[in-house]
Image (cartoon, rainbow, N blue to C red):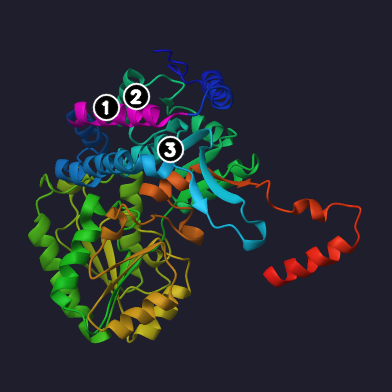
Amino acid sequence: MDQLVKNTGHDALEAGFRRMVELSRTAAPASLADRLDRLTRLRAAITENESGFNAAISADFSHRCAVETTIAETLLVLGEIKHAMKHLKRWMAPQRVATQLQFFPAQNRLLPQPLGVVGIIAPWNYPLQLTLAPAVAAIAAGNRVMIKPSELVPRFAALLQQVVAAKFDASEMTVTDIDGDIAARFSALPFDHLIFTGSTRVGRLVAEAAGRNLTPITLELGGKSPAIVDRSADLAQAATRIAYGKLLNAGQTCIAPDYALVPPEAVESFANKLRDDMQRMYGTDPGNADYTAIISERHFARLEDLVRDAEAQGARIMQLAPMDDSWKSRRKFPPTIVVGATAGMKVMQEEIFGPILPVLGCASAAEAIAFINGRDRPLALYWFGTDTAARDDVLARTVSGGVTVNDCLFHFTQINQPMGGVGASGIGAYHGEWGFRSLSKLKPIFYRSPLNRFADLYPPYGGKIARMEKLLRLMS
């Protein structure tokens, strides 16, 4: 295959991009057969290299639970591909749109067209899923795709580059290198659409770079996603489900519950139940294969600092095991509960992105709503309870990227629902048809009928315009 970006230094990066742009403007748009073929090849690339991807991701993390990679990454992407292939013909079809009476018998149609070249800047925390799920949407929409993986997962990035090169011509889809200032140069390219998943801080930089080219962007960011435990909730059930949502991938999940708001009288009981559930799920042995490591020494040190700061300000730290060399040498951070966290602590001021859960007392739904609304819009919100009036009040009066009621994370897996943030937690959305539409130009087309009397609106004006104006007023 013609590997245009085999060595993706600066010159090759820009040359490969220019070639994609040229073909997106001159070649025929990708047909249904073309898109299905590309999706089939992408599916084969994943299934044929699944064990290799698992091993590479685990090596990059120092240890990544294989079950988590399979469930939270591989199967989700394969599900996206299957869904897209099943519905793509309908998505691509021109859509009938109602025509106003005064224009009858004309017709309106909405024609989905490829945007051209889509760039994807991928994160490290779910490198397979958060790289290839957006690529599925881009391919389904008929676009050419350029991917920049995270520098924190070099083994995965190298394998992905190799696998994609074996299955795709570089003019269809290519994976860049991760060295040097590739990321800055990548985000500065005038893509037809740019997708970034990562931190809010870096998202601002990407948006600034894209804005210079007026490049449309989808930003999947993060923030502090709350879990609200209502007085009507089953406390034990809520603790179990929040523990799982918090500790999946060792908390390195953008939609993980970042803190829990619990009735004040239930804080101690809830924290104890959390600790018991965390211990039952993962034990106290840092060698447990089910428990994932922290991605880097820098991220590990940041988590240690959050706990030290909270403790210094009076919080009580409940840790499943003491932090010693057996944990540090594996870069595994013991599951940690922060009881009595306050707004002034670092752990409540920045996204945690690790296995630390602050638990705060909250006397009422109104207090929880005020607390959440006093901060940036979260990417996710979780509500636990059976009081439907209280639930609906929280859902109506808070704004978040998505919500799961009486569980955590699962709104993300709903392929017929959009996934996206709001404000500081993101811009735009994808998943299923939402991704197809986000990465297509939905072009409105008006087909004029020869029977329509628009000519009566042309000069020279006379009595006929008065009659036409009267008719238009009646129809407006």
Q: Is residue 112 visible?
A: yes
- Quarter where residue 265 is shown: bottom left
User: What's the residue at 46%, 47% (across, down)?
Assistant: 437
SS under mark 3: helix
Q: Amino acid at mark 2?
A: Val
Task: Examine the rendered structure and indicate whether residue 156 appears above or below residue 458.
Answer: above
For label 2, the crowd category at 10 Å Cα-Cα, with few meaning under 14, some 14 to 19 and many 20 or more, is some
Residue lying at the far front in this picture: please name it.
451
Residue type at mark 3 is Ala
Judging depth in this view, the residue of 442 and 301 nearest the camera is 442
Question: Looking at the image, is mark 2 or mark 1 earlier in the sequence?
Answer: 1
Q: Which mark is residue 45?
A: 1
Near mark 3 (Cα within 10 A), the count class, few <14, some 14-19 or many ≥20, is many
Image: magenta residue range: 30-50
Magenta stretch, main secondary structure class? helix
Disc on the earlier residue, 3 or 2: 3
Instruction: For mark 2, give the secondary structure.
Output: helix
